[in-house]
Image (spheres, rainbow, N blue to C red):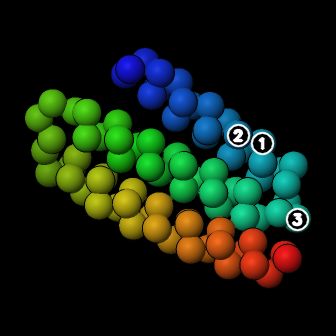
Amino acid sequence: MGNFLLISIIAVAIFVGIASKKFYDKPYIMNFGIAVMMALLVIQTFQMTPIGGLGYAAIILCSIAFLFQVVIGIRNLKTVE
């Protein structure tokens, strides 16, 4: 499970990098891609055995970034329609 999660994070990061160039006119694709990456990072951080202060900070910041990216993605999707 740990290796699959790490490979998923790398795959989503590559997708977001490619999507930033390829789907420039569809920013909601990038927003949702970044949101998925933030969610995967939160899951990965929860799997760390002793979660220290830096781990909790990463969980909080990535959770906030996830929420912002979802809201921005929904707004961008509504403006495109």
Packing grade of label 3 (10 A; few <14, some 14-19, many >=20) is few
**Is 38 left, or right, of 33 in this rendering?**
left
* Quadrant where the image shows the C terminus: bottom right
Q: How far apart are the alpha carbons under marks 1 and 3?
A: 13 Å
**Is 17 left, or right, of 57 in this rendering?**
right
Q: Residue at x 25, y 40 (%)?
A: 46
Q: Amino acid at mark 3?
A: Asp
For the residues bearing labels 2 and 1, Cβ distance under 8 angstroms: yes
Relative to 29, is 6 above or below? above
Q: Which residue is mark 2?
A: 15
Looking at the rendered structure, which numbered label has been put on residue 25? Answer: 3
Q: Residue at x 52, y 34 (%)?
A: 9
Residue 34: x and y in percent read 58, 53
Circle nearer the N terminus (3, 2)? 2
**Is 10 left, or right, of 63 in this rendering?**
right
For the residues bearing labels 1 and 3, Cβ distance under 8 angstroms: no
Q: Amino acid at mark 1?
A: Ile
Q: How far apart are the alpha carbons under marks 3 and 2?
A: 16 Å
**Is 29 left, or right, of 74 in this rendering?**
right
Q: Which residue is mark 1?
A: 18
Looking at the rendered structure, which numbered label has been put on residue 53? Answer: none
Q: Quadrant of residue 27?
A: bottom right
* Quadrant where the image shows the N terminus: top left
Q: Residue at x 70, y 56 (%)?
A: 30
Packing grade of label 2 (10 A; few <14, some 14-19, many >=20) is some
Q: Amino acid at mark 2?
A: Phe
| Local SS, label 3 | loop
Relative to 21, is 11 above or below? above
Residue 75: x and y in percent read 67, 78
Packing grade of label 1 (10 A; few <14, some 14-19, many >=20) is few
